[in-house]
Image (spheres, coloured by chain):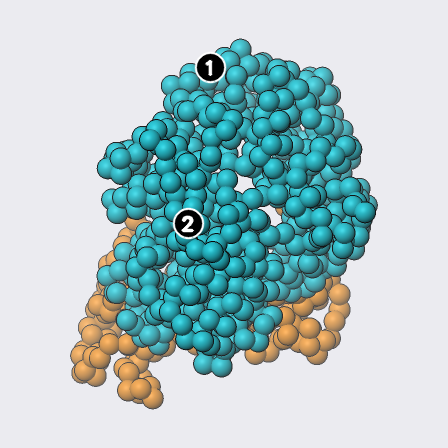
Chain colours: A orange, B cyan
Amino acid sequence: MIRIRIFYAKTEPMRYTGNLDINKVLERALRRADLPLAYSQGFHPQPRMNQACPLPLGMTSTAEILDCWLEEDLSLEEINNRLQPALPPGIEVESILIIDLQEPKVQTLVNSTEYTATLLDEMPPEELASRIQSILSADTLPRERRGKKYDLRPLIESLAVLAPDENDRQRFLMKLAARQGATGRADEVLDALNIQPGTARLVRTKIHLLDPVNPQTPD
Amino acid sequence: MLNHLEINNKLERILINVERPGRYTGGELNEVLKSWEDTQTHVALVFPEIYDIGLSNLGITVLYDLLNKRKDVWAQRAYLPWVDMEAALRQANIPLYALESKRPLSEFDIIGISLPYETLYTNTLNMLDLAQIPLFSANRDDNHPLVIAGGHAAYNPEPMADFIDAFAIGEGEEVIYDIVNVFQAWKERGEPRARLLKDLSGIPGVYVPALYQPVYLSDGRIAEYKPLVPEAPHQVVKRIVAELPPPPTHLIVPSIDIVHNRVAVEIMRGCTRGCRFCHAGMVNRPVRERPVEQVISAIEESLKNTGYEEIALLSLSSSDYTNILELVEKVSERFNSQHLKTSLPSLRIESFSIDLMELLRDSRSGGFTLAPEAASEKMRNIINKPIATQQLLETVRAIYSRGWTTIKLYFMIGHPSETLEDVQAIADLCKAVLEEGRKAIGRKAKLHAGVSTFVPKPHTPFQWVSGDTMEEIRAKQDLLRKQLRAPGLKLNWSDPRDTMLEAVLTRGDRRVGAAIYGAWKNGAKFDAWREFFNYDTWLAAFEHAGIDPAFYTHRQRDLDEVFPWDHINIGVSKSFLIKDYQWSLQGKLRPDCRDHCYACGILSTFAESRKNTPAESWKCPEVA
């Protein structure tokens, strides 16, 4: 039995595939790759797979992380050789690592996430900077999501304007908390900035994992 | 009209705001991508329902696979948007597009629509409207795509005759190539559209409604269907493939969850049981079986290409597949260990079916399904589906005892000559079945009874009968609801208004088209969906079109009446159907024709095909 960590990108063809469906997508890719996925016990055995951090529908990512357990001790090269041709459009595997079986579950090690937002509509750079500034200077940002009230401000670790992209579209970076019970959502930030859904393209660019040996220290 | 690049840009704005946007993006594993400019002929295959339902449709899957094997054709897919996306498309003026390329359907050469059942008719019109293609065939010119349709509802093409340029009658595997070839030759010559329609009419199995004139008698019945040009044959004979070609294995895998996520393989086409209510059993003759090895290797290939976790073996009556035990044993041997679930529907009511199901992994989780249809000996003889109550009870006793807690039984009310007594027999039988379950496993035993309502279908021995009225149906359903109220017992029934609509459309003639158009114009769509079906809209549409629904639903036909589908030849002769209908009136059974040929007409119609196929694959007797 080995545990592997797959670092992968979720690209354009899978932008509108939500988190639950992505699990199925990955499960099927592993099956097509003829990789011996381990299954849980019980009446309805589930494949042993853990996503580090769910990615909401409508976003792409260059930095996704999936842990899974294989019943055979295959080499990383063998795993990669089988996996690459079995990938569907929209999933690109960047690298694979072997992880110690004893390490805590990957989802418990997630500390924060980073996203890049690209505005599809024109906005004067001063306007964008000013909106970002009002968010950052606010003490609280009371919001409601799915009937629950919460404060978005403490979940925003940083917000910064980036250089415009090659088509001159405004961009900014956000770093959000992603811990149990304290997860900032990128689409909530957009809404707080008064940016309409569908007018900004979101890409997750990093998932920060804590050091598994000493989980209190961010990496 | 927007082009595909503009459509892509606009989609980014709206997709995040609709439900399940993955329905509208394409980009799935195994979709076929080609160069638009470098491909000669563009075909859009359309299933007139939402993506979740349409994607797994086997007919479209087969045609997609076959057409894309040709270098000169690119077949793409389109489905109907759900209502929220429809509103967004209309508001943004985005025409309906194909998933692969995002090109508007109106840019395609041929639109091929699958019509498996009649409640998709208004969806079909809505689809054409969203594609900005004229709804009426007569209003299309040389710049519009050719609009063709096929599928089970096409065996009576008349209600949709005003909207479809050409119907492909029967099996599509070969005729689709013929249609493309004729289209290409016509396009090359640069002649007007009228010439294309005549050329298509010359293809065996293709029906071009515009080339026929229905002539009516003073009482509204049909006098004849007059061919208007010499190219149009008096009868269009369905196409069949002599042997089933290998099944498609590069199945498209959706990136979102849909209704059916599995490898579906047709193990056999056609049925020899001769149940008299059954449209599929009559129109899909002759029976042709796929060899066991072909099924197994198709499953293996498909699993390799998809990574699906479920397999479905499809046919009208799996127990009749000659080597069913060998097939199930091989399937369980190869695939049970891989966390794969196999479903095997349509099994006979006998204990051997339990043996088969036990070989399949996880089979007990879904319940065991049987379809007795009737519960009294009288009705069983009338519909020609004899299954003794004793045998049914023995079978269910064994099912409950061997690990299943839930049994699903399918019944049908509304058959000719049925009385409340016969319906009472259904209730009694259900109670007896549940009692068997209680005796075997106590209160864990469950029974789900699905009671649908019979609708007389074209091309069956019951095509002459008058159907039950709504009041009669309601009375029968009331009886069942009163009687079948008990713990462990669940009863499902069909809304009689759904039944009435189906009954008009299925035996409708060309005049019904005006009502379909009127209903659509007044908002009818997704008629198969409870939350959308509006019976009043349809009643108003019938009235406005001058149509009396009862003329189609509640009228006993004389044996010599000309039907709106008589010019469509399914290979089974009308005289055979008449004889079978008369036998039903006498309660006379007609056993499985694998054992004894009744000369239904299939063999004489397709004698040439039969001669050229190996004996084992085709279940009609050999011809010299």
Mark 2 is on which residue type? Answer: Tyr
Where is B352 relative to A11, above or below? Answer: above
Please tell me whether mark 1 sits on a helix, a strand or a loop.
Answer: helix
Q: Position of residue A160 (x, y in %)?
A: 30, 80
Mark positioned earlier in the residue sequence (2 or 1): 2
Q: Chain of mark 1?
A: B
Q: Quadrant of residue B18?
A: bottom left
The reply to whether residue B460 is visible in this rendering is yes
- For the image, the number of numbered tags is 2
Q: Position of residue B416 (x, y in %)?
A: 52, 21
Which residue is at the front of the view, B498 or B91? B498
Where is mark 1, residue-wise? B479
Q: Are marks 2 and 1 on the same chain?
A: yes
Q: Position of residue B323 (x, y in %)?
A: 80, 44
The reply to whether residue B27 is visible in this rendering is no
Determine contact: label 2, label 1, CB under 8 Å: no
Which residue is at the front of the view, A150 or A130? A130
Distance of mark 2 from mark 1, alpha carbons? 46 Å
Residue at screen point 65% across, 26% down: B385
Q: Residue furthest top?
A: B421
Would residue A1 appear left or right of B406 to someone viewing this image?
right
Please tell me whether mark 2 sits on a helix, a strand or a loop.
Answer: strand
Q: Quadrant of residue B600?
A: top right
Quadrant the N terminus of chain A occupies:
bottom right
Where is mark 2, residue-wise? B212
